[in-house]
Image (cartoon, rainbow, N blue to C red):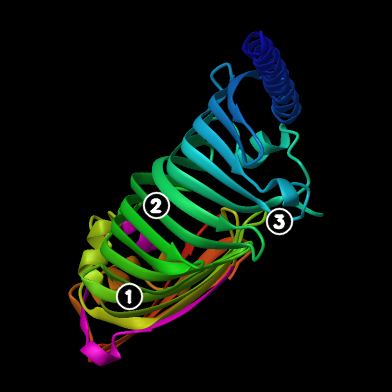
Amino acid sequence: MLKRIILILITILAGIVFITVFYSRSLVSFMLKKQLYNIFPQAEVSLKVSALNLNQLRVSDIDIHKNNVYSINIKEFLVAYNIRSLLKENSWEVLLDKPEIKISTPQKSLASFANNLNLPNPSGKSMIKSVNINQGVVNLNSVEINTFIDFSANLDLVDKVITELDLKTSLIKTLGVELKNLFLHLNSSQGKITIGQLNYSKIRSKDITANVALNKDELRISDIKARLFNGDITLNVEIDLKNPFSYKTNLTAKGIDIETLVKDLDLDKKFVMTGKLTGKLSLEGVGPNLKILGGEFSTVEFGGGQLIIMDTRFLEGIAKNSHQSMDLIVDSFKNYQYNVGLVDLSLEDNNILIKVSLDGDNGKRNLSVVLHNFKL
């Protein structure tokens, strides 16, 4: 009789526990969906609360998508906490297992896409101490970037640093630049990056290495070393990641082969030029718009070279500006040998001004080229 009563009591208690847990999970599921509906208006949301107890909340098979605009899939979302410090600031540890994020807005920027979301204000107190992202995938297709990225990361939200990040992608296309076989490793928001090849228009650069430091909204890429136009360049870049993003760049070049540069830029039908350049270049911009440009290059270290101009329209312009006959100008740029060459770059009203001064045994030659309304 006593055993039967105990068995009945255990059954009743088990039922109460089951009902409590069931409805607790249902309530948490309802609250999570409501929050996600608020963040992602008009999106379809599904998820499953697979565990809820005094130490953790485990949500699996999270799916958020809106037509063909974006989709977010997370295999598992785990929040680990201590019941004694459940409501304490910076006490939760979050795990995102195999998140897959796809955003496709080919006619819009990522910033305009983000403006359509009701993202929570990051200011104020946070319950989250750290976030661990395991085997994440990001697929982006927008006006400014097209890429597919694999990554894993550990984020410290108390000190606001990336404690560890491993990122790799076979291709990134952004603002006319192609980056192939990019690998990035960060530890405490500092690390190294390697890029197999960089393409911009007809420009090719290979085997790029650099140091990287990320501090909140500022990204610094320093001591970038690469081969460019059969010469060597060292580059330092500072990028402000806030919208709109801005950048500052300083470049030092040595032994840039002018003949290779002319061919890679598809200018070899207009003129032929040999020699090697050494110098410095600095530029600043906001988004695709260049704001400041300054550069000085010289052939002094490597000697002179040869210049032959075949573009008759360009020669006609020189003749007109110098008030000299066309025959005289054509003859003066026929197999012209120079001993010293100087190149000066500047920016004026969104136009890049290139001034070339050459000095040889047959006299001096001065050339000017203007690239109108230049944008990256």
Of the image marks 2 and 3, the number of the one nearer the N terminus: 3
Query: Where residue 158 appears, x then y in whole percent?
Result: 67, 62
Question: Horizontally, is 258 left or right of 352 in the view?
Answer: left
Measured Cα–Cα span from mark 2 to mark 1: 25 Å
Q: Secondary structure at mark 1?
A: strand
**Mark identifier at residue 167:** 2
For the magenta stretch, what is the residue range?
A: 292-316
Q: Earlier in the sequence, mark 2 or mark 1?
A: 2
Q: Nearer the viewer, residue 80 or 2?
A: 2
**Residue 332 vs residue 285, the one in the foreground:** 285
Vertical side of 177 occupied by 365: above or below: below
The image quarter containing residue 187 is bottom left
Most extreme residue toward the front, as rendered? Answer: 1
Q: Which mark is residue 90?
A: 3
Residue position for label 1: 233
Q: Is residue 309 visible?
A: no
Q: Nearer the viewer, residue 198 or 231?
A: 198
**Which is in the foreground here, disc 2 or disc 1?**
2
Give how far across and how far down residue 28 sits, in percent. 71, 26
Q: Nearer the viewer, mark 3 or mark 1?
A: 3
